[in-house]
Amino acid sequence: MRIGELAARTGVPTKTIRYYEDIGVLPRPGRAPNGYRVYSDEAVERLRFIRDAQSTGLTLAEISSIVELRSEGIGTCGHVVELLESHLDDLDRQIQNLRDARTLLVDLTRRARQLDPADCTDPNRCQTIARLPEGSVRSRKGRLR
């Protein structure tokens, strides 16, 4: 099949297919006498694998490492588990960072509701975002408590 049919069957744009060939995650296909790329059903399966692997969060470099191991006849299950665990750890860190950011935003919003806009006189900073000494909150009258 030609690249257009491969793209239609997999939902992967032709430009992306060519890129995957360039970086080696998809083997270069044979050529027809007219110079067109000719793909086998194996290319369909490889592109589906790449798409599925990307949906788990794996990068193209990680997917390439899996493909390389497989091409050498080496089992990849342990390697894939390590990659997925690494992504889980990253995700857990991101979740914690988001929780911390949410806590900060809740605190800032709570504090902002207690501030008097008339007290905001700094031309460079909004009093809502300006850091105050830990534990202090301005009252509506502008005094620190």
Image (spheres, rainbow, N blue to C red):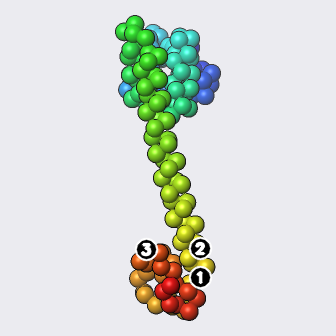
Q: Which numbered mark, 3 or 1, is in the foreground of this view?
A: 3
Looking at the image, is mark 3 or mark 1 earlier in the sequence?
Answer: 1
Neighbor class of circle 3 (other Cα within 10 Å; few <14, some 14-19, many 20+) is: few
| C-alpha separation, residue under disc 3 versus residue under disc 2 | 15 Å
Observer-nearest of 66 and 100: 100
| C-alpha separation, residue under disc 3 versus residue under disc 1 | 16 Å
Query: Residue 10: x percent and y percent?
Result: 60, 24
Is residue 7 positioned above or below 40 on the image?
below
For badge 2, the amino acid type reads Arg
For badge 1, the amino acid type reads Gln
What residue is disc 1 on? 114
Image quadrant occupied by the N terminus: top right
Element under disc 3: loop
Is residue 102 positioned above or below 112 on the image?
above
Query: Residue 141: x percent and y percent?
Result: 56, 92
Observer-nearest of 2 and 114: 114
For badge 3, the amino acid type reads Glu
Residue drawn at (43%, 33%) of the image: 86
Element under disc 1: helix
Dot 3 and dot 2 residues touching (CB under 8 Å): no
Observer-nearest of 93 and 137: 137
Dot 2 and dot 1 residues touching (CB under 8 Å): yes
Residue drawn at (50%, 85%) of the image: 145
Residue drawn at (52%, 26%) of the image: 53
Element under disc 2: helix
Residue 96 appears in the rendering:
yes
Residue 3 appears in the rendering:
no
Neighbor class of circle 1 (other Cα within 10 Å; few <14, some 14-19, many 20+) is: some
What residue is disc 2 on? 110
Name which quarter of the figure residue 102 lies in.
Answer: bottom right
Dot 3 and dot 1 residues touching (CB under 8 Å): no
What residue is disc 3 on? 134
